[in-house]
Image: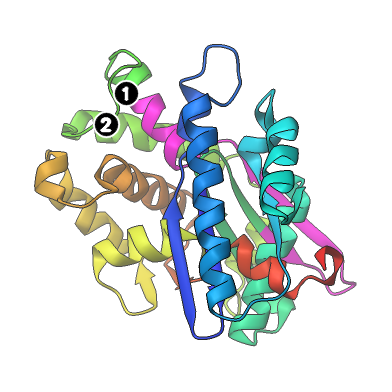
Amino acid sequence: LETALEVTGGYERIRVDFEADLHDSRDGSFSQEIMDKGLATLRKLKARAIDAGAKNFAGVATRAFRTAKNGEAYLRKLEDETGIKLHIASAAEEARMGFLAAVDAGDFDPRNIVVWDIGGGGSSMTMQKDDGEFVYYFGELASVVLRDTIIRSIQNKPKSVKTPNPMSASEVRAAMDIVRGEALGVPLVLRRKLAEPDTKIIGIGPVHFHSVRGQVKAEEVYTQEAVAKKLKERTGMTDEEIGDPWADTEVVNLILVNGMLEALQIPAVEAMNINVADGLLVDPNYW
């Protein structure tokens, strides 16, 4: 989970990896360590927001909180301790907020875009039909999920291993096969929308904007060709050679995005520096 603070003229993102913590859990619950870190982070962000002049506060929790056995109880504790109104969003609510945020930020015609969001434990694609109805695709494969699948199922390493790097070319190919299989789940109506020449594919969230776009050094639009080239360059690199705090998922994200782009025949993605937090700001249901 990326906990975000947005105020006029500023944006801050702090990594609190609830999804990875849940993957390591024996009973499907958040650990005390990650809950303490989450509370401390939320308090810090609220204090900074107050310094910036914020008067009202709201937040949404996503997939990890929907999944964790103690997700609801922990959210209520966060609410009590911080005074922030918090809500566990359903998958559809989360996807809708991302879509609304993209439309608002990019001034797009909502009928001409597909919004693609990738998180730590899940992903989504969202379109809006001419009658206003939303169509969603929800994928189980995402950044942390694919990372752990590679480590445990492809590399046959134990849970104690936290990075798949360095990855061999054969391991990358095996992971790409998994992603191509995931792409088969995208419904036909969305595939047809993706294939229309006027459709823009908008990538939101840190995987698209910070990880993939950042790695290929694109301004806004990154291409499938550029992602494939960077993946080839980073195959075999260690975390130290990659050299950033997100190294354990950087190559994984290239595999995930490249596999989907290939399978769905998407030539390019316009990456935007927005996420569900931006959707929260423009969705009146949470204020």
Residue 152 is one of the magenta-drawn residues: no
- Find disc 2 in the rendering and name its residue: 163
Tell me if residue 246 comes above or below residue 71 in the rendering.
below
Q: Residue at x 37, y 52 (%)?
A: 258
Front residue of 51/106: it is: 51
Residue 57 position in % (x across, y down): 71, 66
Residue 51: x, y in percent?
53, 76
Q: Is 149 within the magenta? A: yes
Secondary structure found at label 1: helix
| Residue 144, percent from left and from top | 43, 36
Residue 56, image x and y in percent?
Answer: 73, 71
Residue drawn at point x = 54 percent, y = 65 percent: 47
Instruction: Give whichever of 79, 13 is nearer the camera.
Output: 79
| Residue placed furthest toward the left | 241
The amino acid type of the residue labelled 2 equals: Thr
State the CA–CA distance, disc 1 to disc 2.
Answer: 7 Å
Question: Looking at the image, is 220 positioned above or below residue 256?
Answer: below
